[in-house]
Amino acid sequence: SLSSANDTTVKLRIMLSTDLAARGLDIVDISHVVQFDLAPDADTYVHRAGRTGRFGAQGQVVSIITPEQEFVLQRLANKLFLDIDCIARQKRK
């Protein structure tokens, strides 16, 4: 549980998994998938991201990537007709 600024308790459930969880697990109410390792192909990306969109539900997928992986993510987005936004970019030193 987390406490917010107005002392309201918010329950937060986190599940860490490998790609083994990308297929076959049916866990309800997953709102976010965070990828620390970019999917190698569109099929794997859909299976990972699909954990958020079960039975018409909405969700967000966050992919943490290196600058060299940007073109791969853009290629996946184009193939899957996805809109992607960069929410942060670390400056190179």
Image (cartoon, rainbow, N blue to C red):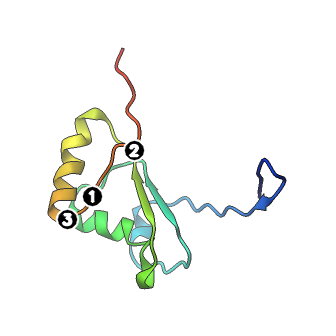
Q: Of helix, strand and loop, which one carries label 1?
A: loop
- Give the foreground label among 2 and 3: 3
Packing grade of label 1 (10 A; few <14, some 14-19, many >=20) is: few
Residue to which mark 1 is pinned: 83
Type of residue at label 1?
Asp
Q: Of helix, strand and loop, which one carries label 2?
A: loop
Tell me the CA gap for discs 3 and 1. 7 Å
**Which of the 4 image quarters holds residue 59?**
bottom left
Type of residue at label 3?
Phe
Q: Of helix, strand and loop, which one carries label 3?
A: loop
**Residue ranking furthest to the front:** 6
- Of callouts 2 and 3, the N-terminal one: 2
Residue to which mark 2 is pinned: 64
Looking at the image, residue 15 sits to the left or right of residue 35; the answer is: right
**Residue ranking furthest to the top:** 93
Pick the residue in front: 85 or 49: 85
**Which of the 4 image quarters holds residue 23?**
bottom left
Residue to which mark 3 is pinned: 81
